[in-house]
Image (spheres, grey):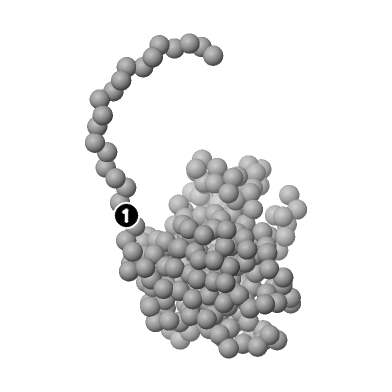
């Protein structure tokens, strides 16, 4: 059975092993500032679980993934599904439609919906930082995404040596790729899973409720990293 999972899990395991006094400045006249644009509520998703609530912002630069996710949320497809695969220090995965009525012995991770896959939408500025929302996929050469299964990154901090190596690996398929200074700082502080960049489409991020990821990632697991106690969720658009 096909599995919407991570074809580079081995890389994850490998990765885990590695006063001068100055004059007072002159006061400057106050100038009007332009407030940051509010995030459209049509792009915000509320994810409710027994471990707390997360608010996810969907990216406009990944329109196919954004629109598909909004459609599924509005249709109620995700209501009462499970986070069926949880790996602490890595990610929490959900969205398998077969998980809604699955018993405790069911093998999950192979479910999808009619309509085929979604073409990859890699945007270099969107990285697998903690809280990133990304699409799961099968081992396919186009790196096309599942039309329903997703994961939310927990990850862990990296150092420059690790990031340099990952950068070199990614350049094998994208010679122009490089981590910006801001991205490096993010990976070295809040953490993430940088070795997944440019391999899986990141199409949103958790902007509230990062602690919920940690709580879910820490639950007791059984075979295939499935939580021993079901972790269900429901979603709605904040519009």
Give the side of residue 31 with respect to residue 51, left or right: left
> Quarter-wise, where is residue 33 in the image?
top left
The quadrant of the image that shows the C terminus is bottom left
Q: Nearer the viewer, residue 140 or 93?
A: 93
In depth, the one of 214 and 71 nearer the eye is 214
Residue 232 quadrant: bottom right
- Locate the N terminus by quadrant: bottom right
Q: Residue at x 42, y 76 (%)?
A: 73
Q: Which residue is mark 1?
A: 38
Q: x, y (%) of residue 69?
A: 42, 73
Residue 154 versus residue 189 in the image, above or below: below
Q: Is residue 70 visible?
A: yes
Seen at 26% across and 42% down, the residue is 34
Secondary structure beneath label 1? loop
Q: Is residue 161 above or below residue 121?
A: above
Task: Give how far across and how far down residue 172 sits, in percent.
Answer: 57, 54
């Amino acid at each position: 059975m096909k599995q919407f999972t991570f074809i580079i899990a081995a890389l994850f395991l490998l990765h885990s092993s590695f006063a001068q006094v100055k004059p007072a400045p002159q006061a400057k006249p106050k100038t009007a500032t332009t407030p940051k644009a509010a995030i459209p509520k049509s792009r915000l998703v509320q994810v409710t679980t027994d471990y707390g609530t997360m608010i996810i912002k969907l990216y406009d630069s990944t329109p196919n993934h954004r629109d598909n996710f909004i459609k599924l949320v509005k249709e109620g497809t995700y209501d009462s599904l499970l986070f069926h695969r949880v790996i602490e220090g890595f990610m929490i995965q959900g969205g398998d439609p077969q998980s809604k009525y699955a018993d405790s012995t069911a093998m999950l991770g192979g479910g999808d919906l009619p309509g085929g896959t979604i073409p990859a939408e890699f945007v270099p500025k969107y990285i697998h930082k903690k809280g990133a929302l990304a699409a799961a996929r099968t081992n396919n050469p186009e790196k096309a995404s599942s039309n329903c299964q997703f994961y939310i990154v927990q990850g862990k901090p990296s150092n420059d040596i690790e990031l340099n190596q990952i950068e070199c690996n990614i350049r094998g398929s994208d010679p122009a790729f490089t981590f910006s200074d801001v991205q490096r700082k993010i990976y070295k502080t809040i953490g993430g899973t940088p070795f997944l960049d440019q391999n899986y489409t990141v199409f949103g991020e958790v902007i509230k409720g990062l602690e919920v990821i940690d709580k879910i990632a820490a639950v007791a697991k059984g075979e295939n990293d499935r939580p021993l106690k079901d972790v269900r969720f429901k979603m709605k658009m904040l519009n």
